[in-house]
Image (cartoon, rainbow, N blue to C red):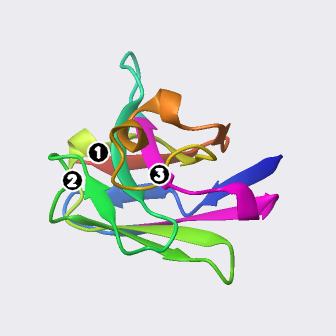
Amino acid sequence: QVQLVESGGGLVQAGGSLRLSCAASGRTSSTHAMAWFRQAPGKEREFVASISRSGSNTDYADSVMGRFTFSRDNAENKVYLQMNSLQHEDTAVYYCAASTRYDGGNYYATRTDGYDYWGQGTQVTVSS
C-alpha cells in the first residue's frame, strides 16, 4: 500500500502562485509515475501533469503548459507542483496519484485508470 497526502492548496488571486506538495509513504519503492489531476465542481477529473520515476520525463496538459512545473524528490518521497500565473479556470480540487504499473511517458500515465493510489485532494481556489 502507498499513502499520499497533499498540502499547499488555498485561496489566491488570479496571476498569483501556489506550490502543492504530495508526501508518499508505505511501499513507495513500488511506484513509478506520479501525477496531479484536478476536478472542478460538476466536471470530470482531468489530467494536469505527470512525472517519471527518475524525474527526467514530465508531461503537462495543454491548459497548464508553461505555467506549472512538476518536480520530484525521491529521497524525500515527495512531489511538488509549482503553479504560476494562476487563472480562475484553475480552481479545483487537486489530487496526487501514484502508479505501480506505468512510468512517465506512457499513454496511461495521463489517464486516471493508469493510477493505483490517490490522495484525498487539496482545494485550490483562484479569485478573478
Q: Tag 2, which secondary structure? A: loop
Residue picked out by circle 3: 35
Q: Looking at the image, is mark 2 or mark 1 nearer the viewer?
A: 2
The percent position of residue 108, horizontal first and vertical second, equals 40, 36
The percent position of residue 61, horizontal first and vertical second, equals 23, 46
| Res 41 quadrant in image | top left
Looking at the image, residue 2 sits to the left or right of residue 108; the answer is right
Q: Tag 1, which secondary structure? A: helix
- Dot 3 or dot 2, earlier in sequence: 3
Under mark 2, the amino acid is Val
Looking at the image, residue 29 sits to the left or right of residue 107; the answer is right
Picture residue at 44% right of the left edge, 73% below the top: 55
Q: Label 2 vs label 1: CA separation?
A: 9 Å
The percent position of residue 51, horizontal first and vertical second, equals 42, 61
Vertical side of 13 occupied by 70: above or below: below
Q: Looking at the image, is mark 3 or mark 2 nearer the viewer?
A: 3
Residue picked out by circle 1: 90
Q: Label 1 vs label 3: CA separation?
A: 16 Å
Residue picked out by circle 2: 64
Vertical side of 104 occupied by 77: above or below: below
Q: Which residues are magenta?
A: 19-38
The percent position of residue 63, horizontal first and vertical second, equals 16, 46
| Res 38 quadrant in image | top left
